[in-house]
Amino acid sequence: MLTTTRAIALGLLVSLAAGCADNPVTPEEHFEARGVVLLRSIAGSDSTIATVDTTHISGRIVIDTSAGQDFIVRFIADDGALGLPSPDADGVWENDLSISVSDTTIARAGQVTRWGFRLNGIRPGATTLTVHLLHGGHDDYVSAPIPVVVEP
């Protein structure tokens, strides 16, 4: 009985070792964000509207109900520089942008592009917006909630 148990254990150990040799796990290099900056292009130049650096939030989004506003997203990398993820060597984008609004009766994220989005004011009030950097279908970075005020 003991010999059978040893044989099974040895067989499992060999299977695991062979599996690891055929499919080594290597760390994947990809863009790491620690924060996000929201910009608006006004008269041809980009103006910072809100910044989230780890958990520190500065600024807020103020829009009205008459028209949507477009925002540009830039991420703060681990080294503090502003940047964006790049496509892989084959030109395939592994990252996507997602925007969530906590109260969609006040504001809604409209069209989301590669690194920008449109925010539409629905009715006057206050809510928050969260920026998600997706990698392979999961959240790689989620911002702290950014205040949003919708005026009439």
Image: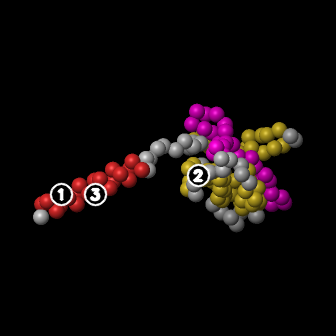
Q: Which mark is residue 126?
A: none
Q: Which mark is residue 12?
A: 3
Q: Inspect the magenta stretch and tell me whether residue 31 lies in it.
A: no
Give the residue number, with chain letter if any, for mark 2.
Answer: 135
Q: Are marks 1 and 2 in contact (CB under 8 Å)?
A: no
- Residue 7: image location, x then y, percent: 20, 58
Q: Which residues make up the magenta segment? A: 60-89
- Residue 12: image location, x then y, percent: 28, 57
Residue at the location (66% across, 53% down)?
Answer: 97
Give the residue number, with chain letter if any, for mark 1.
Answer: 6
Does dot 2 land on a helix, a strand or a loop?
strand
Taking depth in this image into account, of 41 and 26 the one nearest to the observer is 26
Please identify, in this view, whether the residue under mark 1 or under mark 2 is nearer the observer. 1
Q: Quadrant of residue 136?
A: bottom right
Q: Amino acid at mark 2?
A: His
Residue at the location (71% across, 51% down)?
Answer: 114
Residue at the location (70% across, 46% down)?
Answer: 73
Quarter containing the C terminus: bottom right
Please tell me how crowded label 1 is: few (under 14), some (14-19), or many (20+) other residues with Cα within 10 Å. Answer: few
Q: Inspect the magenta stretch and tell me whether residue 86 lies in it.
A: yes
Horizontally, residue 3 falls left or right of residue 62, namely: left
**Of callouts 1 and 2, which one flags the residue occurring earlier in the amino acid sequence?**
1
User: Residues under labels 2 and 3: Cα distance?
Assistant: 34 Å
Whether residue 102 is visible to the viewer of this picture, yes or no, is yes
Please tell me how crowded label 2 is: few (under 14), some (14-19), or many (20+) other residues with Cα within 10 Å. Answer: some
- Residue 81: image location, x then y, percent: 64, 34
Horizontally, residue 122 falls left or right of residue 29, namely: right
